[in-house]
Image: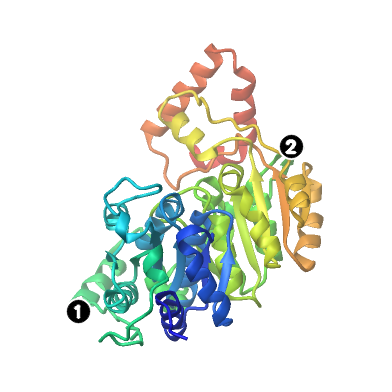
Amino acid sequence: MAKKVADQLVDTLEKAGVRRIYAVTGDSLNEVNEAVRKNGRLRWIHVRHEETGAYAAAAEAQLTGELACCAGSSGPGHVHLINGLYDAQRSGARVLAIASTIPSREFGTEYFQETNTIKLFDDCSYYNQVATTPEQFPRMLQGAMQAAISSCGVGVIGLPGDLAAENATAGLSSTFSFPTRQRVCPAEQEIRELADLLNNAKKVTLYCGIGAKDAHPELVQLAKYEKVRENLRSAAAVRGKEEKIQPEYVISVVDELSSDDAIFTVDTGMTCVWGARYLQATGMRKMLGSFNHGSMANAMPQAIGAALAYPGRQVVALCGDGGISMLLGDLATIVQYHLPIKLIVFNNRSLGMVKLEMEVAGLPDWQTTMLNPDFARVALSMGMAGYNVINPDDVFPTLQKVFNADGPALVNIMTDPNALAMPPKIEFSQMLGFAQTMYKLMMEGRSKEVLDTIDTNLKHWKDVF
């Protein structure tokens, strides 16, 4: 029986080391889905939203350094990939995206679900082409994979549904991928100049990204931050009160209970701040976030990719209530694939970072308050353990129970909506803007909110003054 283009795709992915495709099947992707079923070795991970699939693939690629794959069906399916692919591209994640399209004979006719994938993905990929013949496809597929691997980013291959069903041709392209491992080294003179700067400076801040991952012991030895750590520990000691649990205390407990090689994923916003400040590096722990693209809703889907890539490691998703609300349906994906992810929801009933940005700018926060569902009950309804924590005394025992148990779980912790993430250095303009906001709130009859903010953040005043 002749091999189809879809079979050729799956065989090539397997040879390239791809282990799974994150996708929602349907319409133009059906032939690819069938090819994966017949292959039996490549896994089809049925996410509930394609954006989740793109994030999961990017997380897998970042953690393993290998090529990962996601796919979207024609029109809305592959459009949903875009946000996650932007994040992958800006994070240097080796991701192949299969953008399945309408039948090639219908291009340019405003056919149902027609999109222009070249325009759609051009800004978030290193390679972006659409194959229309069996002869083109193997060369384009190899080009997309090699671009993703060598350039550390996204390669997009457009695959019309009718082409996927056609008989494959061998073509002239290699059937193997050739991974590259670039090593970028500064010139010797630049190293000396940098050493002089470090030695002669009175205050030094080390801002090190994933490029320094193999120099962890050296960085720790170079960095002297005992005073900073002392201030952080004192802030974490304040536990808060009922329904106003201090987020610093929550993250300090998470840090204490997590394994030395845990993988953490952090949502963009306040949760990212708490994770960056209070999760202690061990040399084996990993932390993923949307650090360059800055998208909400990244933590939970990234945890899916992490858990599938490293089934033996503890995976902890630190989610904001705003972030997890966006892709809440993919809790079902976690349950379906029995992924033992621990989801910690910092539920401050608001878009906390946006609220803080407005306050510092002298603007009373508006439209940042969130009316949330009971996330614990939502988790239970989807088949995973769910817990609500409203009292600070329950934080440690609940998290300890969850971390010691098998299987996925969600812990919905009611944190203080007025908790501030203080910057290392407070500028006068920030203080002025914040004071203006507090004054405006009082003039609007929101004095209680002002008093609550002052009370919540008394622990920081010694740093301010």
412 above or below 405? above
Marks 1/2: CA distance? Answer: 54 Å
Q: Quadrant location of residue 222?
A: bottom left
Is 316 positioned to the left or the right of 403 in the image? Answer: left
Tag 2, which secondary structure? loop
The one nearer the camera, 120 or 184, is 120
Residue 381 coordinates in the image, percent (x, y): 77, 49
Q: Residue 377 sits in which quadrant?
A: top right
Amino acid type of the residue tagged 1 in the rendering: Ala
**Residue 412 x %, y %:** 71, 47
| Type of amino acid at the residue the image marks with label 2 | Glu
For disc 1, the marked residue is: 187
Q: Is residue 403 left or right of residue 319?
A: right
Q: Secondary structure at mark 1?
A: loop
Where does the image place residue 54, in percent across and percent down from the top left?
A: 47, 60
Numbered badge on residue 243: 2
Q: Is residue 338 visible?
A: yes
Residue shown at 41%/82% (left/top)? 12
Q: Residue at x 41, y 77 (%)?
A: 9
Q: Position of residue 237 (x, y in %)?
A: 68, 50
Mark 1 or mark 2: name the one nearer the start of the chain: 1
Q: Residues within 10 Å of mark 2 (few under 14, many from 20)?
A: some
Viewer-nearest residue: 64 or 192: 64
Circle 1 residues within 10 Å: few <14, some 14–19, many ≥20: few
Q: Is residue 91 above or below residue 361?
A: below
Query: Residue at 32% of width from left, 79% of height from top?
Result: 138
In the image, taking residue 124 as reference, residue 299 lies left or right, namely right
Residue 236's tag is none
Q: Residue at x 49, y 73 (%)?
A: 63
Q: Which of pointers 1 and 2 indicates the residue nearer the eye?
A: 2
